[in-house]
Amino acid sequence: MKLKKAGIITKIAIFAMIVYAAVTLVRMQAQIETALAELEISRQQVTEKETTNAELRYAIEHSDDPDIIAEAARKDLGYVAPGEKVFYDTGN
């Protein structure tokens, strides 16, 4: 039984498929790295939002606490206690 040798066209076609597969794998690897970076950013954002939610939940649960009310008045409304002096750093 004799085997025929592959022709030049067959060799070129196989080489082209190998090159195509290699290029596709490199592109996919780049896409995977990008997706992993986006995933890490999303995880950090989720952590930040969970922290913010916990702070807001605490503020809501303790909304009748005078210290929380005073803090909100200072932070959100710019109020100060009688006799209190506020200094602003304008050097930055």
Image (cartoon, rainbow, N blue to C red):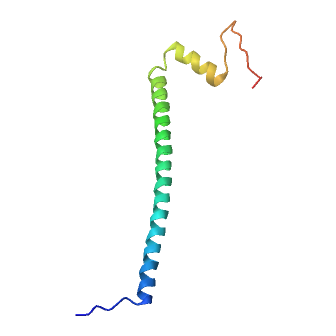
Is 58 or 43 nearer to us in this picture?
43
Tell me: residue 34, above or below residue 41.
below
Q: Residue 80 sits in which quadrant?
A: top right
Tell me: residue 2, above or below residue 25.
below
In-image side of 2 versus 7 (left or right): left
The extreme left residue here reads 1
Residue occupying the point 47% across, 25% down? 60
The extreme front residue here reads 2
Q: Report the number of discs.
A: 0
Where in the figure is residue 2, as x and y percent of width and height?
Answer: 26, 93
Where in the figure is residue 24, as x and y percent of width and height?
Answer: 46, 68
Residue occupying the point 46% across, 48% down? 39
Where in the figure is residue 78, as x and y percent of width and height?
Answer: 67, 21
Is 38 or 84 nearer to us in this picture?
38
Q: Tell me the quarter of the image containing the C terminus.
A: top right
The extreme right residue here reads 91
In-image side of 89 versus 55 (left or right): right
Is 2 or 41 nearer to us in this picture?
2
Residue occupying the point 45% across, 68% down? 22
Is 34 or 13 nearer to us in this picture?
13
Residue occupying the point 58% across, 15% down? 70
Where in the figure is residue 83, as x and y percent of width and height?
Answer: 70, 6
Tell me: residue 48, above or below residue 76.
below
Tell me: residue 25, above or below residue 44.
below
Q: Tell me the quarter of the image containing the N terminus.
A: bottom left
